[in-house]
Amino acid sequence: MLTEESKIDSITILEDNKLEIRRADIVLRDGVEIAKTFHRHVLSPGDSLVGQDAKVILIATTLWYL
């Protein structure tokens, strides 16, 4: 059986406090990884965090608002 999962596997803080987030999309066949693709996006201080992963929200609010 084929299944797909997505997870945030990298969050990098850039020099200007922007966050570079990498999401891995993994295709599994009977629990064994058969394919993986990546998607990256960047968030700048003040950007909306609506819909972001909980880890991203935690890091962004700590970095930008404390």
Image: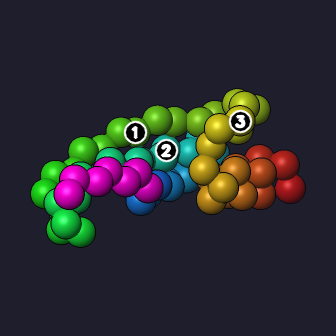
Could you say whether the residue bearing mark 2 is in a helix, strand or loop? strand
Circle 1 residues within 10 Å: few <14, some 14–19, many ≥20: few
Tell which circle, 2 or 3, labels the residue nearer the N-terminal end: 2
Tell which circle, 3 or 1, labels the residue nearer the N-terminal end: 1
The residue where tag 3 is placed is 50
**Residue 33, located in which quarter of the rendered image?**
bottom left
- Res 4 seen here: yes
* Apparent side of residue 21 relative to residue 48 in the rendered image (left or right): left
Measuring from the top left, give residue 1's x and y in whole percent.
20, 57
- Res 63 seen here: no
The residue where tag 1 is placed is 40
Measuring from the top left, give residue 9's x and y in whole percent.
41, 59
- The residue located at (19%, 66%) in the rendering is 30
- The residue located at (62%, 59%) in the rendering is 55
* Residue ranking furthest to the top: 47
Q: Amino acid at mark 3?
A: Val
Measuring from the top left, give residue 54's x and y in whole percent.
66, 55
Q: CA distance from mark 2 to mark 3?
A: 16 Å
Q: Which mark is residue 20?
A: 2
